[in-house]
Image (cartoon, rainbow, N blue to C red):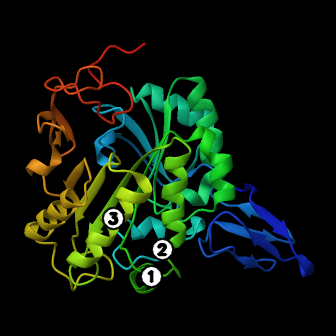
Amino acid sequence: MKKLAKFWEKLPDKKVRCSLCPWRCVIAPGKLGVCRSRKNEDGEFYTLVYGSIVSMTPDPIEKKPLYHFWPGTSVFSLAAPGCNFKCLHCQNWTISQVNVEKVAHEDIPPERTIELTKRYGCKGIAHTYTEPAIWTEYAIDVGKLAHRENLYNVYVTNGYITIDALQELGPYLDAANVDVKAFNDDFYRKICGVPSINPVLETCEWMVGHGIHLEVTYLVVPRENDSPEEIRKFCKWVFEKLGPEVPTHFSRFYPHYKMTDRSQTPVETLERAVKIAKEAGLYYIYIGNVPGHESDNTYCPKCGELLIERYGFSVTRYELKDKQCPKCGAKINIVGEHASSKRG
């Protein structure tokens, strides 16, 4: 639905400048921003996707992937059409690369989202599948209501959002998985259609600094971002700027959209990335999109004890006691209780 937007300023000749994401689009009357979801109407700026839902379903929180945040719980996942990236390998391009009027959707106010979350027995809401930054106004309003109901509010995001917008969103955002799609500007320009990786890194660092639980995902694309040197630089940044306790996911690429000429990522390449991450000092390293791989599990970084066993998106074994390793007592970076735990 259409609603007056936040995060913008008026310019001469009825133009506006959007300040929601680092594009900072200058938009003439009657025109849309890069994300297709925000429009200048006669000098006033509107979001066109406030509560415009193209996809909604209960999911395991592990699917986001968030492995260290309320493990084993269900999350009510929802998405609006549009994105501020143009990734050539997008899995959800049929809803991310379209205008709202060209895709079937249902307008759902924040109150209704909370009702559905509770009806499906979910512990929180995930803004996911497309880029949630484009409907931050809605996510803020959902987050306010969610916190009143003791529900969490999370983003699965490309991280391309301004610090100004994060400062308003932050109090109502509990966790995020940020896709760090590569560790060089060329990939972001050529594959994602944006000028630079720097705003993504700034978002991650801001989230850690402001107490938002963060996990990062690096989709390993053959011949594009899979060199040991690049992965080593990425891991060094995680260690130095985010901290070794931030969970890091190396995910397997499958051919999609405009990159069907590539093969899927060899498992050996992902295992090499895990080895590099361990050498860099990271504590919690996972392989994604390879069900049953041992790197889907959580081990104690101090003594190596198996703490959480997973298969796909399911937790099959949970051994943590009060967020500590039962063998050596090491404190483990986990937010919230396991789904089977008593909640208060």
Q: Residue 233: which quarter of the image?
A: bottom left
Q: In terms of secondary structure, where does tag 2 sit?
A: loop
Q: Residues within 10 Å of mark 1 (few under 14, many from 20)?
A: some
Q: In terms of secondary structure, where does tag 3 sit?
A: helix
In the rendered structure, the answer to whether residue 39 lies left or right of residue 214 reads right
In the rendered structure, the answer to whether residue 336 lies left or right of residue 339 reads right
Q: What is the spatial separation of the Cα atoms under label 3 and label 1, in whole angstroms?
A: 17 Å
Q: Which residue is mark 2?
A: 197
Q: Which residue is mark 3?
A: 236
Q: Which mark is residue 273?
A: none
Q: Considering depth in this image, is 313 or 275 the residue closer to the camera?
A: 275
Q: Are marks 1 and 2 in contact (CB under 8 Å)?
A: yes
Q: In terms of secondary structure, where does tag 1 sit?
A: helix
In the rendered structure, the answer to whether residue 325 lies left or right of residue 20 reads left
Q: Which residue is mark 1?
A: 185
Residue type beneath disc 1: Asp
Between label 2 and label 3, give the one nearer the viewer.
Answer: 3
In the rendered structure, the answer to whether residue 281 lies left or right of residue 242 reads left
Residue visible at 42% across and 54% down? 242
Residue type beneath disc 3: Lys
